[in-house]
Amino acid sequence: MNGLSPRRGFTLFEVLLALAIAGSAMAVIAQVVWSGMDNARITQDLVQAELLAQSLMAELLSGIRPLESSDNGSFEEEADGLDEPERWTYSVVVTPLESESLVSVVVTVRADPDKPRPVEYSLCQWVLIPSTEEAE
């Protein structure tokens, strides 16, 4: 026997290696959590945009709003239950089709158009416009 007892415990190198692995794992987990939160926000905004577009289309079809093209409309007047209504804008495009009594109505709702990943949702519907002869 050489008289030296084997050392117990970890060496400095093993401790530093373990800390580096733990730090890298925490950085990856933090990035995954951040990405998940960002995607959740985008999904929430897309659902809100879809609901706003459907509501606006229903108002157009029911006659509450005139069935005509408009650009850069705002939802600030309809702020009931809407968080940050100034973020949201809409446009309506009414296009006559080949048939005289049909028009295409496209409602587009946007949030944060100046941000790197803006949210946009479009809803298209063909609408039958009664002719003046049928209305009489």
Image (tube, rainbow, N blue to C red):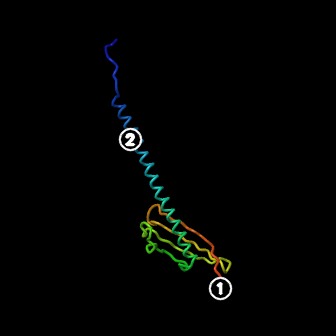
Secondary structure under the numbered disc 2 in the rendered image: helix
Q: Nearer the viewer, residue 31 or 116?
A: 31
Q: Quadrant of residue 62?
A: bottom right
Check disc 1 and report the residue beneath it.
Answer: 135
Foreground: disc 1 or disc 2: 1
Q: With 134 as the anchor, is 1 left or right in this view? A: left
Q: Quadrant of residue 20?
A: top left
Q: Position of residue 120 (x, y in %)?
A: 51, 65
| Residue drawn where x is 67% and y is 77% of the image | 98
Mark-to-mark CA distance, 1 and 2: 73 Å
Query: Label 1: how many residues lie within 10 Å, few (<14), some (14-19) or many (20+)?
Result: few
Q: With 17 as the anchor, is 69 left or right in this view? A: right
Check disc 2 and report the residue beneath it.
Answer: 23
Secondary structure under the numbered disc 1 in the rendered image: helix
Q: Which corner quadrant holds the N terminus?
A: top left
Q: Position of residue 4 (x, y in %)?
A: 31, 16
Above or below, 80 relative to 40: below
Inspect the image, locate mark 2, and give the three-letter code of the amino acid beneath it: Gly
Mark before the other along the chain sequence, 1 or 2: 2
